[in-house]
Amino acid sequence: MRRLKTGALGLAALLATATFVTAQEEGVTDDEIVIGNVLPMTSSAALVGRAAHFGSVIAAREANANGGVNGRQVTIRTEDDGYVPARTVQGLRKLMDEGLFGLIGTGAGAGTAAILPILEEEGIPAIVSFSPLQAAVDPIKPSVFMLGASYQDLLYAQLKYIHDNDSPESPKYGVIRQDDDFGNQVEEAFHRAVDEFGADTAEPIRYKRGQKDFGAEILRTRSDGVNVLVAGGVTTEIPAMLKEASKFKLDLRIATVPTSTLPPIMQLSAPFGYDYYSGDYISPRGSEGSQHFEDMAKAHLNEEEQGALNRYAITGYIATSIMIEAIRRCGDEPTRACAVEQMESGEAFDTHGITLPLDFAPDRHISATAVRVLQVDPEAGSLTPVTEFTEY
Amino acid sequence: MDLFLNLVASGLVIGSIYGIIAIAFAIIFKTTGVLNFAQGEVMMLVAYTSWSLATSLALPFWLLVPVTILAAALIGVVIEFVFIRPMSGQPVFSIVMVTIGLAITLRSLIIMIWGPDAAPFDASVEGGLIEIGPVVLFSEQLFALLLFCAVSAAVYLFFRFTRIGIAMRATAMDETSALLMGVDVRRISSLAWAIAAVVSGLAGVAFAVMFARAPDMWFQGLQSFPAAILGGLDSPLGSGAGGLIIGVIAALSEGYIGHGLKEISGFIVIIIVLMIRPYGLFGEKELERV
């Protein structure tokens, strides 16, 4: 009888444990919460992927240094997708197998698009911030949020500024863009602007991802008489275009995506004598607004890691901080559903001055969409805001 | 006419890079029967090494080139010794798979050593802009064209007139007979890899000087492979010419037609050429006695 009683107690204890284990949310243990990234840590986009990863790391270490999230330490796990959409899916699957609560890095645009169905199906809270993609939040996906203006807005803002304030005589607009989803967004921004302005345009020029030689593209631009150019390169394509343009001393107003403000890209662009425009929804590094981020970076990263930082680290930092705060607001038993509920509650998230306080709503899963146009002088290494943050 | 000439010049410049890398593909294939899918990565490794030499030792360009040649040869020999020689006697397919693995390894290794950031290649070729009639070129673009001519001439003279070059051709034609004639076949394989590393490495330096040294340079290897197919994989000079043809056709297609034809125009030409000459424009038809 006694043996039976002991056995029953043991079974009850085992069941209780099993029930407790199954009740706990994916990626959460008694002392840890796992937030993941799938980012290009290698390939031509590693420059931005690594920075975004370290932005997440800073946010996690900052939280952990302050006692963690309701007693749990935040762990950042990052998978490399090599800038290949299929590998973004693989990376997410691996993170899910290992236990994942929420996701910050969602790969580049095509990678994000590829994993959206999985995020929806699994109800994984995700904040798209690495490569804004309109489809991530329009229509709304219950667990997916996005920070930052889309490429459409970022480029439209610049073209509008050029049109209103810096238009050449007899303006003719042209675009050189990559032949993928990123390039589609670039071209959409171009069409939105030129249709609104009723501007004279040249036919858009598409190039293959990985291409570095833009001799023929720039010759066509010259032949078409373009003097306002959207240089839709991702990283080193931008200086490659500027170099060819400088060969023929083309007088151009140039709009670019935010990667053009990264120090290596500015360094590569410097010899060719062009200032260009860029746009952003965050305060640039070195400005007053990014001071807290800079302090945290110094406190939580070693020198080599700090060397990998750029604006993408700031966006990674903001997104991860928001996710951590949403989890914190859920209390001792965080669940994915609760984190989503907290994010869309309308209560603002403080970004320490990097942006205005950010919030989401059930019918608006996007925030930080106001854009400021920057004038970039690559030779001086300077970024000068020429507009205030404005919604476009 | 101005547009046409500049498009041709632009095509010849990038075609020179494709052509030189294609020559490297052909040298290894002709000598060992192996398609080296890591050629672009070897090119990138040499370019990065050269960049380090240029920046750390502040070598002038005229000195950097011979030092790079030595470094590239060493890289080629080491890769052959470590990765290829142990595969001796194995099916060619297995060796090709090793080169694919090598490619991925080298890409990661380069990022581990030099990091993911692109950087300018400071050892610039002096001269600035050069105007030849209506054609405008940067001096480094002219350097790429001259490099193509120099490499093509050197490869031709080497295979045609030197004892080792003739031994390499003999090995390519019949390895067993060459072995019986006293040719050190292992040494020939090692030499082929060294020459290919030097040739493609110089293309890598020219490319990095023109654009930047960046971890996606290996992609040029992939871009160059069709040139080798077009020219004939067993014909180093033909492969080089294939690079020029693809470069010029791509530039003219983009300049006059657009609509993404730049990328496919070369392949359209390849399909047509291979339908007429399956062994490439300058390749040799393989004859078998039965």
Image (cartoon, coloured by chain):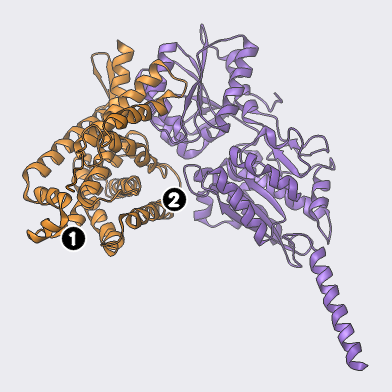
Residue A122 locus on image (x, y percent) = 74, 50
Q: Within 10 Å of the Cα at label 1, are there few (<14), some (14-19), or many (20+) other Cα atoms?
A: some
Residue A149 locus on image (x, y percent): 67, 32
Q: Which residue is mark 2?
A: B115
Q: The numbered mark 2 sits on a residue in which chain?
A: B
Quarter containing the C terminus of chain A: top right
For image coordinates 63% across by 23% down, the residue present is: A157
Say which residue label 1 marks.
B186
Q: Nearer the viewer, mark 1 or mark 2?
A: 1
Q: Residue at x 65, y 35 (%)?
A: A133
Q: Residue furthest top?
A: A170
Task: Indicate the amino acid at tag 1.
Answer: Arg
The mark total stands at 2
Q: Is residue B132 above or below residue B120?
A: above
Name the kind of residue labelled 2 in the image: Gly
User: From mark 1 to mark 2, how far is it between C-alphas?
Assistant: 35 Å
Task: Using residue A68 as the reference point, say whether residue A169 is left or right of it.
Answer: left
Rendered view: A3 above or below B44: below
Colour that chain B carries in the picture:
orange
Task: Read off the chain for label 1.
Answer: B
**Secondary structure beneath label 1:** helix
Residue sitting at 74 percent across and 47 percent down?
Answer: A121
Residue B115 is left or right of residue B278, and the answer is: right
Chain A, hue in figure: purple
Q: Tell me the SS state at disc 2.
A: loop
Does residue B125 appear anywhere in the picture?
Answer: no
